[in-house]
Amino acid sequence: ISPGYCWPFQASRSQVVIRLPEQVQPTAITVQHPLKRSSGLGDISSALRDFTVSVSLCWALGAGPQPWEKAGMDGEEETLLGTFTYDIAKEPTQTFPLQNELPRAFRFIRLAIQSNWGKSGNTCIYRVQVHGKVTGMNAVGQ
């Protein structure tokens, strides 16, 4: 990954909904950010720090992102899969096993950034990977 080539958010708190290429039963999430020494300015305070990962049961049925736009309406609830902390003092690529695994697959997953490492104006995401079992119609062996 190259410093500066990130997905920037204009705050220390933000969220993104990721559409997966297939239905996946998630088991872990990996986050990657450049090392401090790789950064041109030696500052990586825009790296995410505390974040959550969640899914919506409506999304498991292919309803799309609308349930999170109407949070709390029509009885829709999201399911928290875990709360994590990315540590900039550790390796740049960190994998977090989900704390609450569900016995079903999802097409969408939400990453909600609660804080970063000090930069108030923006947070940068460089790479996010979702790990799990592909259960869609195009899964190998089906």
Image (tube, helix red, strand yellow):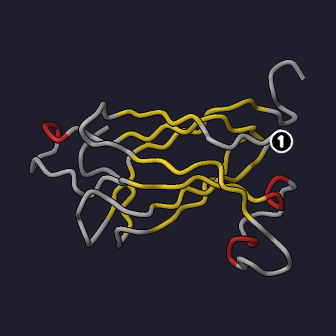
- Residue 137 lies in quadrant: top right
Task: State the residue lying farthest toward the left.
Answer: 41
The image shows residue 27, relative to residue 125, as above or below, that is above
Name the side, left or right, on which 102 lies relative to 32: right
Measured as percent of width and height from the top left, residue 45 is found at 22, 56
Identify the residue shown where x is 76% and y is 32%.
134
Task: State the residue lying farthest toward the top.
Answer: 141
Name the side, left or right, on which 98 lies relative to 128: right
Measured as percent of width and height from the top left, residue 86 is found at 38, 45
Name the side, left or right, on which 92 lies relative to 40: right
Quarter occupied by the C terminus: top right
Measured as percent of width and height from the top left, residue 119 is found at 23, 65
Q: Tell me the crowding category of disc 1: few under 14, some 14 to 19, or many 20 or more residues within 10 angstroms, Cα based.
A: few
Q: Secondary structure at mark 1?
A: loop
Identify the residue shown where x is 31% and y is 52%.
47
Identify the residue shown where x is 30% and y is 30%.
91
Quarter occupied by the N terminus: top left
The image shows residue 58, relative to residue 138, as above or below, that is below
From the image, tell me which residue sits under label 1.
104
Name the side, left or right, on which 97 lies relative to 34: right
The one nearer the camera, 133 or 97, is 97
- Residue 93 lies in quadrant: top left
The one nearer the camera, 129 or 116, is 116
Identify the residue shown where x is 75% and y is 71%.
67
Measured as percent of width and height from the top left, residue 13 is found at 41, 69
The image shows residue 139, relative to residue 82, as above or below, that is above
The one nearer the camera, 95 or 126, is 95
Amino acid identity at mark 1: Arg
